[in-house]
Amino acid sequence: MSESFEIEKVPLHGKSKTLSNITPSNATFLIVLTVSCLVSINNYFCYHEPSAIAKGFEDYYGIDTKQFGTLFTIYSAPNTVLAFFSGQFIDSYGLRKSSIFFNALILVSMLLAALTPTPESGILSPTGVYLMLLLSRLLLGLGGESICACVSTMISRWFSSTQHANTAMALN
């Protein structure tokens, strides 16, 4: 189970960078695969959780079914355009910084949703509560699908030279 380290020059955007072509061991395979799955789990939890408790969500925040549907639409709307730019963002700023940035957007989105008061509390008007929920879902949309691009990039970088690439993509 030895790892082979071969240094090769790979041109990226007209620049010559040195990349390491590492063939991971089985233990490394499992660690990287586990981390890549954990990177995106927060997005899936935040996206699907409100739909599981739709009626309670509507009652708690005093919104109707149409407004609830709009919350999911505003999540998806940025992704009709953002898919074209997230790969460029990852290439420009690097996988690590991009992953941290997109996960930070998801974290802020979760905090906004968690801290959104009920209309009955009197802290915000019903419109203010709904706008806070919309902002939360918009930030989730901006970070959520882009983190999927980060995870795909992570897996392809680690496993492209191994026989485990298809398994890693499928498991993720």
Image: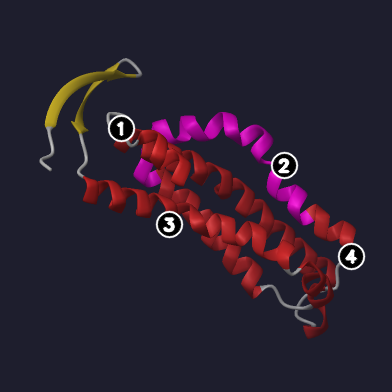
Can you give x and y, in whole percent of width and height, for residue 129 in the image? 77, 69
**Any mark on residue 163, and which?**
1
Estimate the spatial distance between the alpha carbons at disc 4 and disc 3, rounded to whole Å: 33 Å
| Left or right position of 57 against 158 | right
| Left or right position of 148 against 65 | left
Instruction: List the residue tagged with mark 3.
Output: 38
Residue lying at 72% horizontally and 77% vertically, measured from the top left: 117
Mark 2 residue element:
loop
Quadrant hosting residue 127: bottom right
Amino acid type at circle 2 is: Ala
| Chief secondary structure of the magenta portion | helix
Mark 1 vs mark 4: which is more N-terminal? 4
Amino acid type at circle 3 is: Leu
Q: Is residue 111 above or below residue 91?
A: below
Q: Residues within 10 Å of mark 2 (few under 14, many from 20)?
A: few
Q: Residues within 10 Å of mark 1 (few under 14, many from 20)?
A: few
Estimate the spatial distance between the alpha carbons at disc 4 and disc 2, rounded to whole Å: 20 Å
Can you give x and y, in whole percent of width and height, for residue 161 in the image? 27, 29
Quadrant hosting residue 92: top left
